[in-house]
Image (tube, rainbow, N blue to C red):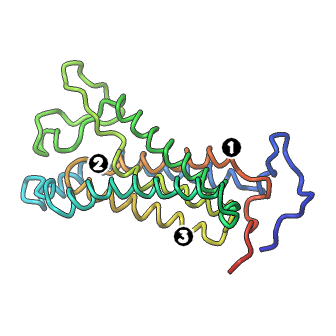
Amino acid sequence: MPDAAPDAPQTAAGRAPLPPGFLLRHGVVPLAVFAIAVAVIHWLNVDWRLATRLYALEGGEWALRKAFVTERLIHKIGHDLSIAAWVGVLIAWLLSFRRPRLRPWRRPLGYLLLAVALSTLAVSAIKAKSNMDCPWDVQGLGGDRPHLTLYEARPHDLPHGRCFPAGHASGGYAWMALYFAFLMIRPRWRWRGLAAGMGVGLTYGIAQQLRGAHFLSHDLWTAMICWTVALLVYLWLRPKTPPGTDALPSR
């Protein structure tokens, strides 16, 4: 795609106007899909049905809670890999101040650092306050607490829950910000970036569901929070060239 014209119109904030329909496609439509999905999960009791099915398939216990693949490989090592990836982006961003070849990547890398960090922090902050239980804490799924949805009042005598939204999955879904990072400089790669973030998020989320750590809706909320944060940070830090233009020549 051709580079943006030098005299592309700018907004008062020094940013190019968004393409027509950008907020509709990236904000309104994802939010509408999310709202419909959450409503369907609630009305059809999908969280409970799926969790009880998994629990039964594992022999009436969360047999995969301590399994090597789900706990050690995906949960613990996966967590470390997410942090390592963020540190790698940080190093690349710092190098962009010293190496001219990396200079065009400075803004996308800085954006990625901020978006990923804020996404995971947002999920963590909500998780600390939401007071929701994990499946393994609930009666009928190995625990002793009543099953309460997000929309039900919680008795004051119940222990504090810290299982909503899905914290571990945020270490994957936060990388959906790659979509917007590539949109800044290599738009043709943006779908690969989105697929990478969604793929890792799904892997982390499914593994945690198999362990009994989260219901399906927990992961859905996490994905939407991460996408929303990524979009908002992009609107703040988007470059002066209009979205959808290649900042670097194609290779």
Label 2 is placed on what type of residue?
Phe
Label 1 is placed on what type of residue?
Trp
**Residue found at x 62% / y 49%:** 27
**Residue found at x 73% / y 55%:** 21
Q: In the picture shown, does residue 135 fall above or below 181?
A: above
Q: From the top left corner, tell me how far across and down residue 46 is, in percent.
A: 30, 51
Tell me the distance, in whole angstroms, between the alpha carbons under discs 1 and 3. 23 Å
Q: Which residue bears the numbered disc 2?
A: 215
Q: Which numbered tag is attached to residue 192?
A: 3
Question: Between residues 47 and 184, which one lies in front from this camera angle?
Answer: 184
Give the SS element for disc 2.
Answer: loop
Quadrant in the rendering for residue 100: bottom right
Tell me the distance, in whole angstroms, between the alpha carbons under discs 1 and 2. 33 Å
Q: Is residue 108 left or right of residue 140?
A: right
Q: How many marks?
A: 3
Q: From the top left corner, tell me how far across and down residue 221 is, in percent.
A: 42, 45
Q: Which residue bears the numbered disc 1?
A: 236
Label 3 is placed on what type of residue?
Arg
Q: Residues within 10 Å of mark 3 (few under 14, many from 20)?
A: some
Disc 1 and disc 3 in contact, CB within 8 angstroms: no
Q: Residues within 10 Å of mark 1 (few under 14, many from 20)?
A: few
Q: In the picture shown, does residue 25 fall above or below 142?
A: below
Instruction: Give the mark nearer the N terminus: 2 vs 3.
Output: 3
Residue occupying the far bottom of the picture: 251
Give the SS element for disc 1.
Answer: helix
Image quadrant holding the N terminus, namely: bottom right
Question: Between residues 150 and 123, which one lies in front from this camera angle?
Answer: 123
Question: Between residues 214 and 146, which one lies in front from this camera angle?
Answer: 214
Question: Between residues 57 and 233, which one lies in front from this camera angle?
Answer: 233
